[in-house]
Protein backbone atom coordinates (compact mmCIF):
# COMPACT_ATOMS: atom_id res chain seq x y z
CA UNK A 1 0.00 0.00 0.00
CA UNK A 2 1.55 3.26 -1.12
CA UNK A 3 0.01 6.51 -0.04
CA UNK A 4 1.54 9.94 -0.33
CA UNK A 5 1.93 12.11 2.75
CA UNK A 6 -0.80 14.42 1.44
CA UNK A 7 -3.21 11.52 0.81
CA UNK A 8 -2.52 10.19 4.30
CA UNK A 9 -3.19 13.61 5.86
CA UNK A 10 -6.45 13.98 3.91
CA UNK A 11 -7.59 10.52 5.00
CA UNK A 12 -6.72 11.20 8.66
CA UNK A 13 -8.54 14.55 8.53
CA UNK A 14 -11.56 12.83 6.99
CA UNK A 15 -11.65 10.23 9.77
CA UNK A 16 -11.29 12.94 12.44
CA UNK A 17 -14.07 15.02 10.87
CA UNK A 18 -16.38 12.01 10.72
CA UNK A 19 -15.67 11.25 14.38
CA UNK A 20 -16.33 14.86 15.39
CA UNK A 21 -19.58 14.94 13.39
CA UNK A 22 -20.81 11.64 14.86
CA UNK A 23 -20.96 9.98 11.44
CA UNK A 24 -18.25 7.49 12.43
CA UNK A 25 -17.99 5.52 15.66
CA UNK A 26 -14.74 4.96 17.52
CA UNK A 27 -14.68 1.28 16.57
CA UNK A 28 -15.23 2.12 12.90
CA UNK A 29 -12.46 4.74 13.06
CA UNK A 30 -10.00 2.25 14.55
CA UNK A 31 -10.73 -0.26 11.81
CA UNK A 32 -10.41 2.39 9.09
CA UNK A 33 -7.11 3.59 10.54
CA UNK A 34 -5.74 0.06 10.58
CA UNK A 35 -7.00 -1.00 7.16
CA UNK A 36 -6.94 2.19 5.09
CA UNK A 37 -3.96 4.00 6.60
CA UNK A 38 -1.60 1.19 7.61
CA UNK A 39 -2.83 -1.79 5.58
CA UNK A 40 -1.71 -4.07 8.42
CA UNK A 41 -3.32 -7.25 9.69
CA UNK A 42 -4.88 -7.22 13.13
CA UNK A 43 -1.96 -9.10 14.65
CA UNK A 44 0.64 -6.79 13.09
CA UNK A 45 -1.26 -3.67 14.12
CA UNK A 46 -1.88 -4.92 17.66
CA UNK A 47 1.83 -5.66 18.05
CA UNK A 48 2.69 -2.17 16.80
CA UNK A 49 0.22 -0.63 19.30
CA UNK A 50 1.46 -2.86 22.12
CA UNK A 51 -2.01 -4.26 22.80
CA UNK A 52 -3.33 -7.79 22.49
CA UNK A 53 -5.04 -8.97 19.31
CA UNK A 54 -8.09 -9.76 21.42
CA UNK A 55 -8.23 -6.15 22.65
CA UNK A 56 -7.97 -4.88 19.08
CA UNK A 57 -10.71 -7.23 17.88
CA UNK A 58 -12.98 -6.00 20.67
CA UNK A 59 -12.15 -2.38 19.79
CA UNK A 60 -12.92 -2.89 16.10
CA UNK A 61 -16.24 -4.57 16.88
CA UNK A 62 -17.31 -2.05 19.52
CA UNK A 63 -17.38 -4.75 22.18
CA UNK A 64 -16.36 -4.58 25.78
CA UNK A 65 -15.41 -1.51 27.75
CA UNK A 66 -12.07 -0.27 26.46
CA UNK A 67 -9.82 1.80 28.66
CA UNK A 68 -8.58 5.23 27.64
CA UNK A 69 -5.07 3.85 27.92
CA UNK A 70 -5.76 1.16 25.31
CA UNK A 71 -7.59 3.54 22.99
CA UNK A 72 -4.79 6.08 23.24
CA UNK A 73 -2.22 3.41 22.37
CA UNK A 74 -3.99 3.02 19.03
CA UNK A 75 -4.69 6.69 18.34
CA UNK A 76 -1.22 7.86 19.40
CA UNK A 77 0.29 6.19 16.32
CA UNK A 78 -1.67 8.65 14.18
CA UNK A 79 -0.95 11.77 16.24
CA UNK A 80 -4.34 11.59 17.98
CA UNK A 81 -5.71 10.96 21.44
CA UNK A 82 -9.08 10.62 23.11
CA UNK A 83 -10.55 13.82 24.49
CA UNK A 84 -13.62 15.70 25.58
CA UNK A 85 -15.63 17.94 23.27
CA UNK A 86 -18.32 20.44 24.07
CA UNK A 87 -21.76 19.30 22.92
CA UNK A 88 -23.30 21.55 20.30
CA UNK A 89 -26.64 22.94 21.32
CA UNK A 90 -28.56 23.92 18.21
Image (cartoon, grey):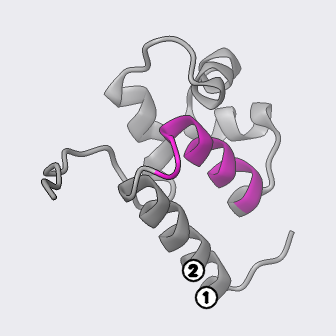
Q: Is residue 25 magenta?
A: yes
Position in image of residue 20 (x %, y %): 36, 57
Could you tell me how far apart the alpha carbons at marks 1 and 2 are, in whole angstroms?
Answer: 6 Å
**Mark 1 surroundings: few (<14), some (14-19) or many (≥20) residues within 10 A:** few
Position of residue 46 measured from the top left corner of the image (x, y, whole percent): 66, 33
Q: Where are the magenta residues, as a range? A: 23-36
**Could you say where residue 9 lies in the image, as x and y percent from the top left?**
55, 78
Question: In the displayed structure, would residue 90 be above or below residue 22?
Answer: below
Q: What residue sits 35% from the left and 28% below the top?
A: 69
Q: Which residue lies at the image location 42% right of the left edge and 50% below the top edge?
A: 22
Question: Which quadrant of the rendered structure holds the N terminus?
Answer: bottom right
Q: Is residue 45 magenta?
A: no
Q: Residue at x 51, y 11 (%)?
A: 64
Q: Secondary structure at mark 2?
A: helix
Residue 57 lies in what quarter of the image? top right
As displayed, is residue 15 above or below residue 53?
below
Q: Give the residue pinned by disc 1.
A: 6
Q: Is residue 85 left or right of residue 75?
A: left
Give coordinates of residue 32: x percent, y percent. Answer: 67, 51
Query: Marks 1 and 2: CB-CB under 8 Å?
Result: yes
Residue 64 in the figure: left or right of residue 88: right
Single out the mark in the foreground, 1 or 2.
Answer: 2
The label on residue 30 is none
Q: Which residue is at 67% across, 15% downward?
A: 54
Q: Which residue is mark 2?
A: 10
Residue nearest the viewer, comparing 56 with 62:
62
Q: Quadrant of the C terminus?
A: bottom left
- SS at mark 1? helix
Task: Give 41 or 50, whichever is nearer the viewer.
Answer: 41
State which quadrant residue 63 falls in. top right
Amino acid sequence: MTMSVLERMILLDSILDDLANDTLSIHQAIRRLRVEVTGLSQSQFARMCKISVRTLVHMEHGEGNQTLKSLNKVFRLFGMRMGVLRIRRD
